[in-house]
Image: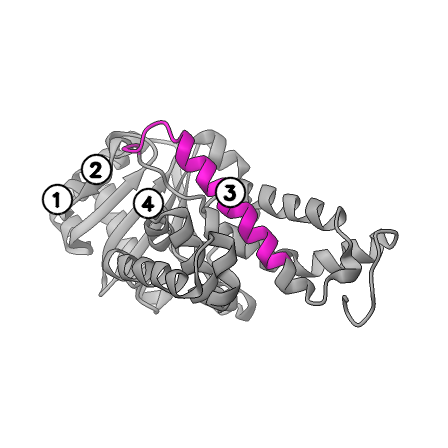
Amino acid sequence: MVNGGYVTMDDADFLAECFEQHRPHLQTVSYRMLGSLSDAEDAVQETWLRLSRSDASTVENLGGWLTTVVARVCLNMLRSRQTRREDPLETHVPDPIVSPAAGGDPEHEAEVADAVGLALLVVLETLTPAERLSFVLHDMFAVPFDEIAPMVDRTPIATRQLASRARRRVRGAAPTPDSDLARQREVVEAFLAAAREGDFERLLATLAPDAVLRADAGPAAAGPLHGAEAVANQALMFSRLGGAGATTRPATVNGAVGVVSFRDGQPAAILGFTVADGRIAELDILADPERIARLDLTGFEG
């Protein structure tokens, strides 16, 4: 039953309308499960195909049914990804959700409050598929363990243990970002200014001692760089390579302060910062031209 009435496969328009109402939620679930915008879209599309092939008149809770289906689709995708990953040491930066910095916009602030940071998505990548599904569905979307258990072929008690194990890993590895976006922006701007001016000591002052840099290009692509000095040295190198014609635009990246870098008018890199306790704890850089080209950068001008 959907919206108080039974839906048959002949009522395709109404079924599609109902599905579109749930699409944003399904996109959010699948993005947090997969860390990839394109994979998330594929998972949502597969969920629609499964709904369109089902007898929707037997579905009493469409939202719950769709969440279960998209979660199962994502679980299969995670398992497939795990088996075909070519180089486990290669640095992977999750797809960022990027928007122009727009302080004071209530809708924008609401989106920021609900966002999942890149640092957390990176930690989620280290979980097993079953751990990730259990943690994401329960801790982020309040799905009961007795509903999650059949998806991972576990008992509710074992599923609770999966989520608990994942929770411990997340708490131990993902820094908690400062909530004040204005203060985040001050720290990031100080970091960028010091990098432009080649001031190593000022760069160090903006970085946490155990700062981490991940990038899908350059030395950090072979594995994250750890420590303030290593990150500062890499930042100086990035700044020198930027050279003439490089500009930056302030952005919000997964709910935190970020930057879109342009070269010759074209987007060249997305920088996402995790500022914790007044210093930059993590810096994630996406510079793959093909991946950047797939991002929605509406509102930016090079």
Q: Main secondary structure of the magenta part?
A: helix
The answer to whether residue 253 of the structure is visible from this angle is no
Mark 1 to mark 2: distance in Å? 9 Å
Q: Position of residue 205 (x, y in %)?
A: 15, 55
Q: Residue at x 47, y 51 (%)?
A: 33
The label number, if any, that marks residue 76 in the structure image: 3
Mark 4 to mark 3: distance in Å? 27 Å
Q: Which residue is mark 4?
A: 284
Amino acid on which disc 3 is placed:
Asn
Q: Position of residue 249 (x, y in %)?
A: 43, 48
Q: Which residue is mark 2?
A: 234
Sequence-first disc among 4 and 1: 1
Q: CB atoms at circles 4 and 1 under 8 Å apart?
A: no
Sequence-first disc among 1 and 3: 3
Density class for disc 3 (Cα within 10 Å; few <14, some 14-19, many ≥20) is: some
Q: CB atoms at circles 1 and 3 under 8 Å apart?
A: no
Q: Position of residue 224 (x, y in %)?
A: 24, 40
Q: Residue at x 39, y 32 (%)?
A: 245
Name the front one of labels 4 and 2: 4
Sequence-first disc among 2 and 3: 3
Mark 2 to mark 3: distance in Å? 37 Å
Name the front one of labels 4 and 1: 4
Q: Which residue is mark 1?
A: 229
Q: Position of residue 189 (x, y in %)?
A: 30, 54
In-image side of 167 versus 32 (left or right) = left
**Magenta range:** 66-90
In-image side of 14 versus 283 (left or right) = right
Amino acid on which disc 1 is placed:
Glu
Mark 4 to mark 1: distance in Å? 16 Å
Sequence-first disc among 4 and 3: 3
